[in-house]
């Protein structure tokens, strides 16, 4: 694990460019996590543990010789967009690694099954983050993950929120990787760097992680049987989808380089993730409502206006003042979307999907 996180010697270590969309690091109430009664999903969790121990991707994350060449021909905006993509993906994978590793350590005494499960998920995320960091190294940059661990701020999320959000980030991660993989299988001429050919088994790791979190969620009646859980489900779906739309459009250049239309890609990822979430969450969003994607796109346009203000040479207070009405508009759109009637996933369950 330590080995897979090792940094290439020549690449320059850089600090990450923080903004609202940079993946965060999380901490939680570990005592509550250790005390979770998992008996309602014991069979499912045992089966998942057997799969995780099998470690199907043990030999997958090894760089082959196709990486051994110069990437200097990727220049300008395409290069920058790709480095940004690698950086954000690496921080996101590493964030999972840190949270799972700490959960594993802190629940060990009281919940050995959960501790082993988190340890095995941390193993996978360390491989993913390490692989991405080495890819960054090919472009002359690398993240100092040790420094990040010690110096970056951690956000506290109660374990219930962790279960909803990690479930979603694993499943949206699965769809993001598999859709890029499928697109490049159909259009191999757009595969400009060998990282993408690793995506299929990689996304199966994320799918398994998502299934583990689904079992955790369904083991807690309070997370799917109450009216509050319906609101939380839709709230987290909306925040994950809004973040996705903003991120994809902010990094549109990267998708263009792959020959992907960012707006279509975003819509497909949202539809698929929402459909998948209906197997775990009590309520999901009506993403086919005519307002849904339209308002998310308006948020994305507003976000780009904010980025332009942020980059402009003005005093900080003036930037904040100019951004305020835009933030209010984004909030308004998201509120309207949150208030749209949801889809009752419990009623759908059992139907063929
Ligand atoms: Fe991962
Ligand atoms: Fe994962």
Image (tube, grey):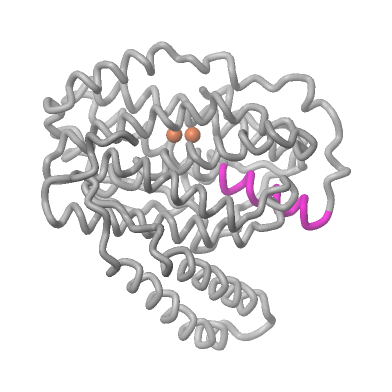
Number of on-image labels: 0
Side (left or right) of 233 relative to 332: left
Q: Residue at x 64, y 44 (%)?
A: 86
Residue placed most toward the observer, 239 or 127 = 239
Name the spot of residue 223 as percent of width and height, x first.
17, 45
For the question of whether residue 324 can be seen, the reply is yes
Q: Quadrant of the C terminus?
A: top left
Q: Residue at x 20, y 54 (%)?
A: 230
Residue placed most toward the observer, 92 or 108 = 92
92 shown above or below 52 = below
Main SS category, magenta section: helix
Q: Is residue 198 magenta?
A: no
For the question of whether residue 138 can be seen, the reply is no
When asked about the image quadrant of residue 249, the answer is: bottom right
- Report the span colored magenta: 76-89
Name the spot of residue 84 as percent of width and height, x first.
65, 51
Q: Residue at x 52, y 68 (%)?
A: 297
Name the spot of residue 151 as percent of width and height, x first.
48, 50
Q: Residue furthest front?
A: 352
Name the spot of residue 147 as percent of width and height, x first.
54, 44
2 shown above or below 314 = above
When asked about the image quadrant of residue 5, the answer is: top right
Q: Residue at x 38, y 78 (%)?
A: 332
Side (left or right) of 8 relative to 216: right
């Amino acid at each position: 694990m330590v080995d897979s996180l090792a940094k290439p010697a020549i690449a320059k270590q850089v600090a990450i460019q923080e903004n609202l969309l940079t993946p965060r690091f999380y901490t939680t109430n570990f005592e509550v996590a250790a005390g979770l009664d998992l008996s309602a999903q014991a069979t499912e969790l045992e089966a998942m543990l057997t799969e995780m121990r099998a470690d199907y991707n043990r030999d997958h994350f090894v760089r082959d010789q196709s990486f051994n060449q110069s990437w200097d021909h990727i220049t300008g905006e395409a290069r920058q967009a790709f480095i940004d993509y690698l950086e954000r993906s690496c921080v996101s994978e590493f964030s999972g690694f840190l949270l799972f590793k700490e959960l594993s350590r802190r629940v060990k005494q009281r919940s050995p099954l959960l501790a082993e499960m988190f340890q095995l998920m941390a193993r996978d995320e360390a491989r993913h983050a390490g692989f991405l960091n080495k890819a960054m190294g090919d472009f002359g940059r690398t993240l100092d993950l040790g420094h990040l661990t010690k110096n970056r701020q951690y956000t506290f999320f109660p374990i219930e929120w962790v279960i909803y959000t990690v479930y979603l980030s694993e499943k949206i991660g699965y769809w993001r990787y598999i859709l890029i993989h499928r697109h490049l299988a159909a259009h191999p001429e757009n595969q400009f760097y060998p990282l993408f050919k690793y995506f299929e088994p990689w996304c199966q790791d994320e799918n398994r992680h998502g299934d583990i979190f689904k079992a955790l969620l369904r083991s807690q009646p309070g997370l799917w049987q109450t009216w509050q859980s319906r609101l939380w489900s839709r709230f987290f779906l909306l925040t994950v989808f809004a973040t996705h739309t903003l991120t994809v459009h902010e990094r549109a250049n990267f998708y263009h380089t792959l020959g992907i239309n960012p707006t279509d890609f975003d819509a497909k990822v949202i539809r698929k993730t929402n459909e998948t979430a209906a197997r775990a969450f009590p309520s999901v969003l009506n993403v086919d409502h005519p307002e849904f994607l339209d308002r998310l796109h308006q948020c994305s346009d507003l976000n780009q206006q904010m980025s332009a203000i942020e980059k402009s040479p003005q005093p900080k207070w003036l930037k904040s003042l100019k951004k305020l009405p835009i933030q209010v508009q984004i909030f308004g759109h998201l509120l309207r979307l949150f208030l749209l009637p949801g889809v009752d996933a419990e009623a759908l369950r059992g139907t063929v999907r």
